[in-house]
């Protein structure tokens, strides 16, 4: 449990970044064993390895950073 507001914001941002990456690489959720509950839809998906998708991943990482 976060100790203060700043820590809570850091945890929330970390969760958002992690979820963005999992959506872009859904097989990672299965590999980590977290393709359950709210993420169960990721279980049946594979990541797209195309150049266009790689650019989308890079764009998402830049945005998150």
Image (cartoon, rainbow, N blue to C red):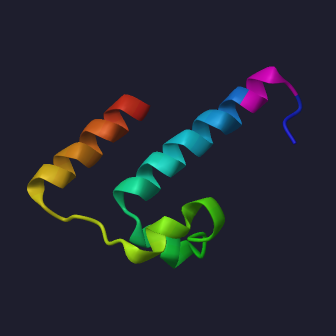
Q: Residue at x 45, y 57 (%)?
A: 22
**Coordinates of residue 65 in the picture (x, y in percent):** 42, 31
Horizontally, is 29 left or right of 36 in the view?
left
What residue span does the magenta drawing correspond to? 4-8
Residue extending furthest toward the top: 5
Asked whether the viewer can see residue 65, the reply is no
Q: Which residue is drawn at 61% across and 44% down?
A: 15
Q: Quadrant of the N terminus?
A: top right
Quadrant of residue 40 within the rendered picture: bottom right
Q: Position of residue 17 (x, y in %)?
A: 50, 42
- Rendered image quadrant of residue 12: top right
Determine which quarter of the picture holds residue 3: top right
**Above or below for 19 versus 16:** below
Q: In this view, does 29 lie above or below 15?
A: below
29 sits left or right of 24 in the view: right
Residue 47 image position (x, y, % from top left): 29, 66
């Amino acid at each position: 449990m976060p100790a203060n507001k700043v820590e809570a914001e850091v945890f929330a941002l970390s969760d958002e970044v992690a979820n963005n990456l999992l959506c872009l690489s859904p097989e990672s959720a299965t590999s980590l064993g977290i393709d359950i509950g709210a993420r169960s839809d990721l279980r049946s998906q594979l990541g797209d390895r195309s150049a266009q998708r790689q650019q989308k991943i890079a764009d998402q990482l830049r945005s998150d950073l």
